[in-house]
Amino acid sequence: MKRLLALALAALVLSGCAVSTTTSVPTVPAQVPTPGGAATAAAGAPPAAEQCPDLLASPRPLTPMPAPGQMPAGSTMAKIAQRGKLVVGVDQNTLNMGFRDPFSGQIQGFDIDMARAVAQALFGNPDAIQLRALTSDQRIPALQHGDVDMVVRTMTITCDRRQQVTFSSEYYEAQQRILVKKNSGISGPDQLAGKRVCATKGSTSLATLQALPQKPVTVSVADWTDCLVLLQQGQLDAVSTDDVILAGMAAQDRYTEVVGASLAAEPYGIALPKGDVEMARFVNGVLDRVRASGTWAASYQHWLFGLLPGPVPAPPAPQYQD
């Protein structure tokens, strides 16, 4: 009897194991995250033609230049010297121009060298400086609100911006170009019609893209690294901005390349509060020294040679107001 009972139980278990049940698992489509604040940029009015014939003209340098620690009484330089630190708005996301070194945690690059040269002239110490990371669209408000003494952040001199800030003489000239994935089929602006192209909010690059006759779909983000991430994720077809910024992106991703001729010249200046002519004259004196002493060429050699094609160029010649 016990043997028959055991056989019956075994048969029941086996029959239970043979029962097939089907569980329905809902399918959830994969969501690719986007950087915070990324959005399709509404096309604005075409940019007006530049109406300032002396676009790059800046106040003549102070002569003679004051020695460190001996700034003219009542000047902006004297107030900064009394505070003990030069406060500068910079980038922390553009490789070799203004970026945070992952090992030291310090912000460094070509733009940072220019800022430190001003601190050296003020204090006799290039480290008497406080760097504040800004996005492109924070640059002018930071100056207007007094949050920084100046901005050295790949900032293009334009007529519109000259109504809001005072610029130094030109210290670097970039060219707006296009970054794409290799073998994308895009070789220049003619292939951008209907393509999703990224630029940062508040940049001249965004306005230049929106004015193209090919009518790309522009996507605006806070920082240039966001553009690179979106391109890598396949959410963009291209990124367009200054060649020195794009070269840094291409150096970080060997599957991308910079293509096409220049869409626009991008002359960089150090931005200062509107109307502070004496500070502009002081900064221009510093930039004159940087050019003449070989400091500019040495900084280019260190940060940009090899990142950009060709030999170390001569620094842009300054233009001064009569």
Image (tube, rainbow, N blue to C red):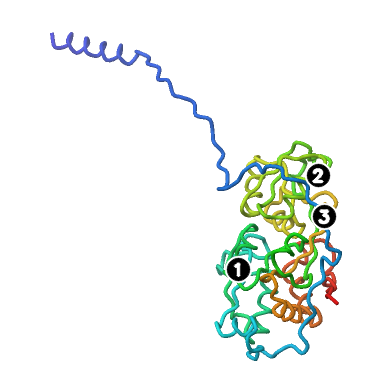
Q: Is residue 129 left or right of residue 287?
A: left
State the image coordinates of residue 78 (x, y, percent, origin top left).
Answer: 62, 85
Say which of 285 and 91 sits in front: 285
Closer to the N terminus: mark 1 or mark 2?
1
Say which of 61 and 286 sits in front: 61
Q: Is residue 70 above or below residue 252?
A: below
The quarter holding residue 281 reads bottom right
SS category of the residue bearing label 1 = strand
Q: Is residue 40 above or below residue 176?
A: above
SS category of the residue bearing label 2 = loop
**Residue at the spot x=65%, y=58% of the render?**
136
**Residue at the spot x=75%, y=40% of the render?**
216
Residue 264 circle label: 3
Disc 2 marks which residue? Answer: 212
Disc 1 marks which residue? Answer: 107
The quarter holding residue 107 reads bottom right
Amino acid type at image mark 3: Ala
Say which of 75 and 11 sits in front: 75
Q: Quadrant of the C terminus?
A: bottom right
The quarter holding residue 80 reads bottom right
Q: Quadrant of the N terminus?
A: top left
Say which of 225 and 3 sits in front: 225
Q: CA distance from mark 1 to mark 3?
A: 28 Å
Amino acid type at image mark 2: Leu
Q: CA distance from mark 1 to mark 2?
A: 35 Å
Q: Residue furthest left?
A: 1
Q: CA distance from mark 2 to mark 3?
A: 11 Å
Closer to the N terminus: mark 1 or mark 3?
1
Closer to the N terminus: mark 2 or mark 3?
2
